[in-house]
Amino acid sequence: MAEDKMEVDQPTVATTPPAVEDEEEDCTDLAELLDSINDKESAGDKIPGLTALLNEPTNRYGPTASALKERAVYSLARAYCEDNRHDEVVTLLTGKTCANFFENVTKAKTAKVVRAVLDAVCSLAPDQLDMQSQICRNIIDWCKAEKRSFLRQRVESKLAFVLFQQDKYGEALTLVDNLLVELKKLDDKQLLVEVHLVESKVHHGLRNVAKSKAALTASRTNANAIYVAPALQSQIDLMSGVLHCEEGDYDTAHSYFLEAFEQLDQLDDQEKAVPCLKYMMLCKILDGLSKALGISSTGATGIRSDRNEADISGMITGKRGVKYAGSDVEAMSAIAAAASKRSLKEYEAVLSKYPHELQDDLLIKHHLGTLQEQLLESNLIRIIEPYSCVEIDHVATLIEMPLAVVEKKLSQMILDGKFNGILDQGKGQLIVYEDGDTDKAMEKGLKVIDNMDKVVTSLFARSQNLRSIQV
């Protein structure tokens, strides 16, 4: 029996090394084939060869063969995007092309490939949001069928961000809420940081600043317990700057934007660094103009505006100016110049000249609307300042705006207490009252009356106590 056992074991030991050697030798043709396919210039020419490589009939899935086929999957995804065959990209991961590959590799390898392909597709076709959404949904359905919960949660986080980019805030918020319930049970802090950040962005899109701040605080709390990559940390700082900017704290917002910009600049991510630079310039413009309007009565407005314009020019000079020069920086510089001159006409000309750079970003669009209102108010105050009574039609002619718009704005400024006056719509006139000094005698008289009231109230209480004692 011992001899029989030895005879059975011997062939197993003897045949194992040649099998490994054969596998390693067989991978040479795969490597050469993959290199020859990638050397082709046209993306359309690469696709048939890559598809055939992934669908080869032989079952070679050792470490070397798996790595080569993984590279083939990435190359095929890039080729589909470059050839604008977005429908093929949607079914790439969940179709027959990659099915055999995923069945013969580990779950960890599958998750890595799926996430890498998804990130590559999103970076190569950033405007194809419908395609990205459909890819995520297909992967989620496949993960549910295969019972791969961790990968599904990762992809659902990506889908929530894509829905946010599509302005589908309600659907994104529902997905985030359900995902957070699962993640809190698992205590996956890395994914919690990302999902809470998406939640903060969704609430900001819904203009709910309070809930957006709460979600960002939760994201920061989880981030403090783990190592956060610089790219993700820059997004947290960027969102903090956005919320401070919404609250009007432009100095703090500028510091957060600067932190995010420096991290992205070190990563050489110019696409994400340019918006941070624009936000920094926006904060300087808004802060400078608000301070200038606040001290306009002293006559020091020009000094403050010139200093603000110098701050803007200092941000885009040197290496930074050369690296990030372009229409985005030019648009913000033109806005800064118009704001420093407090010229509403020049400001509107800049908006019409750079619609893409200034209107596509929600934060810049919202705050430039606020900036336009401030410029309109400052120009109206400058026009009506010499008058005690002026025709509204004359004010509209000087500011070169429709009469109805000027009349509406003047009424809002009166109600907000920006100046003291009334609108006589029957005569079409604006009557401006001078701001008189406060009457100190009246103030002291009111204080005396208030003190007398307290004395009388105290005496009445004492008399009531005495009366109750006598009874």
Image (spheres, helix red, strand yellow):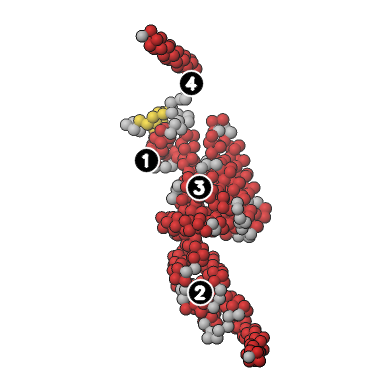
Mark 4 or mark 2, which is nearer the start of the sequence?
A: 2
Tell me the number on the disc at residue 404.
1
Is residue 308 visible to us here? yes
Please give the label number shown on residue 81.
none
Q: Which residue is mark 2?
A: 80
Mark 2 or mark 3, whichever is nearer to me:
3
Q: Which residue was labeled with disc 3?
A: 214
Residue at image position (58%, 57%) is: 232
Residue where numbered disc 4 is placed: 438
- Report the amino acid beneath label 4: Thr
Q: Kindly give the residue lying farthest to the left in the view shown.
A: 426
Pick whichever, 169 or 412, lies toward us.
169
Residue 139: x, y in percent?
47, 69
The answer to whether residue 218 is left or right of residue 21 is left
For badge 2, the amino acid type reads Tyr
Q: Is residue 111 above or below residue 199?
A: below
- Residue contact between numbered discs 2 and 3, judged by CB atoms under 8 Å: no
In this rendering, the answer to whether 339 lies above or below 430 is below
Residue closer to the observer: 214 or 327: 214
Rounded to the nearest angstrom, the CA distance separating label 2 from label 3 is 41 Å
Contact between labelled residues 2 and 1, with CB atoms less than 8 Å apart: no
